[in-house]
Image (cartoon, grey):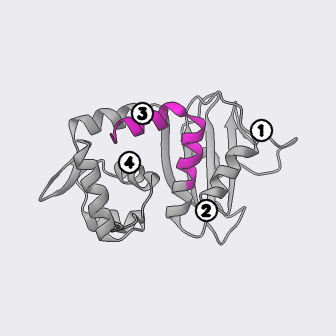
C-alpha cells in the first residue's frame, strides 16, 4: 500500500516556523502560506513533534527550543518578506530574503536553484556601501526601492525571487539561501530529526 504524497516541502515547514512568532491560528497560517488547512495541520504536527512549537486554545507559538533556534537563525537571515518592486516583472509576485555576512562567491548557479524551485526569475544583490549585482559590469537596476527593505551590512546578500505565487517566491528564496549557507541547512535539518 502506498501512503499519501505530501504536498508541502521542507521550505514550507521552514516558512511556517518563521511565521510563528506569537500565537497564530491554523487559518492564518493557511492563508499566509498558501496551503490547505489539512497540510497546515500536518506541518504543525511535525513542528510540535520536534519540540519547536506548542499549541493552546489561543493558537500555535514557539516553544523554548523553537525560540532559541529562531534567534540563532535570525543571526544569519531575515525574511522572506513579500515586497513590491515593479521595476522588473510587474505582474509577478516578489519576495526578498537577506543572508547576513555571506562571503560565498555567487554565480548563476544560485539563480538556477531558484528557477529549479519554480521561480520565474531571481536576482542576487551584494551589499558593500550600496546594493549591486555582482554579475553585472555596471549598475543596470535602480536599487533605491530595495535600500529600505533591511538594515544592510557589508557582505550581506539580498535574494529577490519572482513567481506567480508568494509561496513559490518564498520557497525559492529559501532554497537559494540554504544552498549558500550549509550551516542553515544543517541546523534546520538537525531540528527535524
Residue at far left of view:
57
Residue occupying the point 63% across, 61% down: 119
Q: Mark 4 points at which residue?
A: 18
Residues at badges 4 and 1 in contact (C-beta under 8 Å)?
A: no
Q: Is mark 2 on a helix, strand or loop?
A: loop
Q: Which of marks 4 and 1 is nearer the N terminus?
A: 4
Q: Earlier in the sequence, mark 4 or mark 3?
A: 4
State the extent of the magenta-drawn residues as a range.
172-193
Residue 189 counted in the magenta span: yes
Q: Name the residue under label 1.
A: 134
Q: Mark 2 points at which residue?
A: 118
The spot of residue 13 in percent (x, y) is 38, 52
The spot of residue 179 in percent (x, y) is 59, 40
Residues at badges 1 and 2 in contact (C-beta under 8 Å)?
A: no
Q: Distance between the residues labelled 3 and 2?
A: 24 Å
Instruction: Please give left or right for residue 173 compared with residue 8 in the image.
Output: right
Q: How far apart are marks 4 and 1 (CA)?
A: 29 Å
Q: Which of 156 and 170 is in front in this view?
A: 170
The spot of residue 111 in percent (x, y) is 69, 49
Where residue 172 sits, quadrant-wise, is bottom right
Label 1 crowding class (10 Å Cα cut-off): few <14, some 14-19, many 20+?
A: some
Q: Distance between the residues labelled 4 and 2?
A: 21 Å
Magenta portion: prevailing SS class:
helix
Total marks placed: 4
Residue occupying the point 30% across, 47% down: 21
Q: Name the residue under label 3.
A: 187
Residue occupying the point 54% across, 37% down: 151
Label 2 crowding class (10 Å Cα cut-off): few <14, some 14-19, many 20+?
A: some
Q: Is mark 1 on a helix, strand or loop?
A: loop
Q: How far apart are marks 4 and 3 (CA)?
A: 14 Å
Residue occupying the point 53% across, 48% down: 174
Amino acid at each position: 500500500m502506498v501512503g499519501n504524497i505530501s504536498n508541502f516541502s521542507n521550505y514550507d515547514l521552514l516558512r511556517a516556523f518563521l511565521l510563528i512568532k506569537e500565537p497564530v491560528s491554523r487559518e492564518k497560517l493557511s492563508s499566509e502560506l498558501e496551503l490547505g488547512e489539512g497540510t497546515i495541520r500536518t506541518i504543525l504536527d511535525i513542528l510540535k513533534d520536534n519540540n519547536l512549537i506548542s499549541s493552546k486554545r489561543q493558537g500555535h507559538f514557539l516553544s523554548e527550543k523553537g525560540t532559541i533556534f529562531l534567534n540563532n537563525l535570525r543571526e544569519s537571515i531575515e525574511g522572506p518578506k513579500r515586497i513590491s518592486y515593479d521595476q522588473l516583472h510587474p505582474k509577478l509576485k516578489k519576495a526578498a530574503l537577506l543572508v547576513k555576512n555571506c562571503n560565498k562567491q555567487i554565480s548563476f548557479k544560485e539563480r538556477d536553484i531558484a528557477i529549479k524551485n519554480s521561480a520565474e526569475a531571481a536576482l542576487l544583490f551584494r551589499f558593500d556601501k550600496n546594493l549591486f549585482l555582482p554579475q553585472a559590469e555596471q549598475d543596470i537596476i535602480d536599487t533605491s526601492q530595495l535600500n529600505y527593505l533591511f538594515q544592510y551590512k557589508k557582505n550581506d546578500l539580498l535574494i529577490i525571487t519572482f513567481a506567480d505565487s508568494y509561496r513559490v517566491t518564498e520557497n525559492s528564496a529559501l532554497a537559494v539561501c540554504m544552498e549558500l549557507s550549509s550551516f542553515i541547512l544543517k541546523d534546520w535539518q538537525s531540528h527535524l530529526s
